């Protein structure tokens, strides 16, 4: 394991190729628990070649957006646009929200997904880490938060967040609420509350709950008066044909959504119980992943990797680890066996 | 046919849903000749569900970029990044190339694909239409051109364009060369020439020649020193899993590429011959589409639409029409029959 590989494994989950190179002797196949992606993805239907060949029709994109509004909610006077993965919306948000050339100061509720800070810094903003929602008087132009948060699952209730959004935006400040894991806490979504004020942006993702990270599809919702600035950057065909068709189906499939929520809640309880054998204490998460504190300082990314299991460590919190859910019995068994061995 | 629908059909090709509503009595299926997309697309292989589920690995994105460099060429010291459709690269180019807050003046070789002007105007730039490459002394910060051009096929030879790019960029000015149809004129591509100077950007697309517009994949190439600004806006996963895998295959498939070039050249000659029956005179194009001048002022978009054939008209050139290639014998026959009827 090279130092570079170890660092890469602590920056973003899912780097199975890096892990394989770093641990060539680990048992195969690798079990990837380093992400918060549902391992039992929405089933991919047969894909007519025409979905790849032609651009999605306006009517198909309208259907996609209607399906998203149906699944997520959408306040009156708000607009929802598809994006090719919510990552790109994270990257574009500072460019849309801050006037060109204005140096912004953004507060980000930390710790959280690293791309938010990277995007604002790249746009020239000064980034401050926040531990709670700031006062209106705080010298900030924008606030970014992930709700529920990754990796600790911190959840801000809808009424509290809506009240903050109202006051914050009334003061001419911007708010980005990344609801990438919002399918696990629909009651907290700003999309199920009152109007989205100008300057408030909500992000959603098909990647996590539906297990379709490779599809690259997300949504950005905002006050309809501010939709044109996003359209200007995204153009008319931000969603691929397959993404358009598959996501429209997935978002309308209430039975699958309900069944997945139940199964994930059950699997999350099983994950806590399984990791207890390795003296890993749950300290947050959602039903797609848990954050755990280890009893000592040993490097568990390394120890699990030797067993062919990729987990997520954090550069600045050496005793905290994020575990996603195994997708099958073989995965659960290897995880349990590895935990049992760690105790010795 | 409503006025709105007629306008929509003249803004962008491929709007079969709009055409169907406007002409409910036209014969089905509609034959879409309104785009410059290869109607015989690169064949879609079986798609493992994992391509949709997980993010593309770094190694897979590296493979994709290597395949693109192999197919398109890539000068020493240049970088090539995948984008989710070249449309989004067109939209982002002004943001990458012009300092935030600086009001730019851009010259666009016209007439051409409308999104370039839309993107620069949305970024606050002043847009001038050019009929040829400008003098160095022209009061322009940037030039945009499509090579070969859509819809007229105007081609600037590589040596002339490279010499212009060298002088233009040395003067601190920007150049965007959209090679969306560059697969039909590889000898003219800037990617097969000398180094890409700072401020020069080249766009490529999988949508046209490979017939994979729904896949949403393109590339942006630039001097490697300027790649980070694009990465900052695109993030690490701009290409979907299916796009990554299918495009890597397609770009490496030299046999398919050669066969498609030959077939398209032959079909383009057949298109000219077929349309001659309707007194349509070829006045430009590439092997993916032809631009034709009609003998009179009658509205051929309307007359072909009544026969279930969607072609492309242009708001400001009422006697010019762009025709793409039929994809099968039935399409060729209906086109020929419709041309014969038009004469009467």
Image: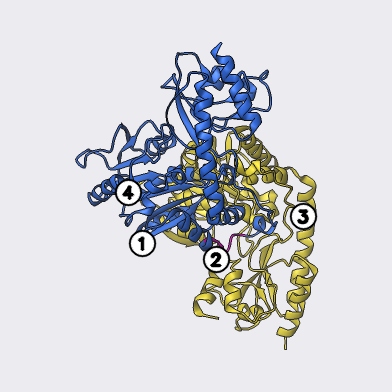
Chain colours: A blue, B yellow
Instruction: Specify which label sits upstream in the sequence, 2 or 4.
Output: 2
**Residue A264 painted magenta:** no
Same chain for mark 2 and mark 1? The answer is: yes
Res A59 label: 2
**In the structure shown, which secondary structural element does the residue marked by tag 4 occupy?**
loop
Instruction: Using the image, name the chain to which the residue with label 4 belongs.
Output: A
Same chain for mark 2 and mark 4? The answer is: yes
Image: magenta residue range: A55-61
Callout 4–callout 1 Cβ contact below 8 Å: no
Give the residue pinned by disc 4. Answer: A99
Q: Nearer the viewer, residue B223 or B6?
A: B6
Image quadrant assignment for residue B138: bottom left
Instruction: Specify which label sits upstream in the sequence, 4 or 1.
Output: 1
Instruction: Using the image, name the chain to which the residue with label 2 belongs.
Output: A
Look at discs 4 and 1 and give the one toward the viewer: 1
Give the residue pinned by disc 3. Answer: B260
Locate residue B46, reporting x and y percent: 73, 47
Disc 1 residue crowd, few under 14, some 14–19, many 20+, Cα 10 Å: few
Res B324 label: none
Instruction: Using the image, name the chain to which the residue with label 1 belongs.
Output: A
Q: Residue at x 63, y 46 (%)?
A: B243
Q: Nearer the viewer, residue A44 or A97?
A: A44
Give the residue pinned by disc 1. Answer: A76
Above or below — where is A135 with respect to B125? above
Rounded to the nearest angstrom, the CA distance separating label 2 from label 4 is 33 Å
Above or below — where is B226 with respect to B120? above
Disc 3 residue crowd, few under 14, some 14–19, many 20+, Cα 10 Å: some
Above or below — where is B199 with respect to B291? above
Q: Is residue B334 left or right of residue B283?
A: right
**In the structure shown, which secondary structural element does the residue marked by tag 2 occupy?**
helix
Rounded to the nearest angstrom, the CA distance separating label 4 from label 1 is 26 Å
Q: Nearer the viewer, residue B13 or A79?
A: A79
């Amino acid at each position: 394991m090279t130092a570079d590989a170890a660092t890469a494994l602590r920056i973003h989950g899912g780097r199975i190729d890096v892990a394989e190179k770093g641990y060539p002797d680990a048992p195969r196949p690798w079990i990837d628990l380093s992400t918060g992606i549902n391992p039992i993805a929405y089933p991919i239907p047969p894909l007519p070649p025409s979905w790849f060949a032609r651009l999605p029709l306006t009517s198909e994109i309208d259907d996609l957006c209607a399906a998203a509004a149906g699944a997520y909610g959408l306040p009156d006077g708000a607009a929802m646009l598809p994006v090719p993965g919510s990552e790109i919306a994270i990257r574009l948000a500072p460019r849309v929200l801050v006037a060109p050339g204005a140096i912004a100061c953004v507060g980000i509720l930390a710790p959280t997904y690293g791309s938010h800070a990277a995007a604002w810094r790249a746009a020239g903003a000064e980034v401050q880490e926040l531990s709670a929602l700031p006062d209106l008087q705080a010298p900030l132009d924008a606030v970014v938060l992930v709700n529920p948060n990754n990796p600790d699952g911190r959840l801000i209730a809808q009424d509290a967040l809506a009240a903050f959004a109202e006051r914050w935006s009334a003061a001419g400040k911007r708010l980005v609420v990344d609801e990438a894991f919002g399918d696990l806490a629909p009651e907290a979504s700003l999309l199920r509350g009152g109007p989205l004020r100008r300057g408030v942006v909500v992000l959603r993702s098909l990647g996590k709950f539906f297990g379709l990270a490779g599809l690259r599809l997300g949504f950005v919702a905002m006050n309809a008066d501010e939709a044109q600035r996003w359209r200007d950057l995204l153009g008319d065909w931000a969603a691929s044909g397959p993404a358009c068709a598959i996501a429209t189906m997935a978002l309308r499939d209430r039975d699958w959504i309900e069944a997945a929520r139940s199964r994930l809640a059950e699997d999350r309880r099983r994950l806590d119980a399984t990791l207890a054998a390795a003296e890993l204490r749950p300290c947050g998460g959602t039903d797609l992943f848990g954050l755990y504190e280890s009893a000592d300082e040993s490097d568990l990314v390394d120890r699990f990797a030797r067993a062919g299991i990729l987990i997520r460590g954090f550069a600045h919190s050496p005793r905290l680890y994020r575990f996603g859910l195994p997708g099958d019995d073989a995965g659960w068994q290897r995880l349990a066996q590895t935990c049992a061995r760690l105790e010795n």
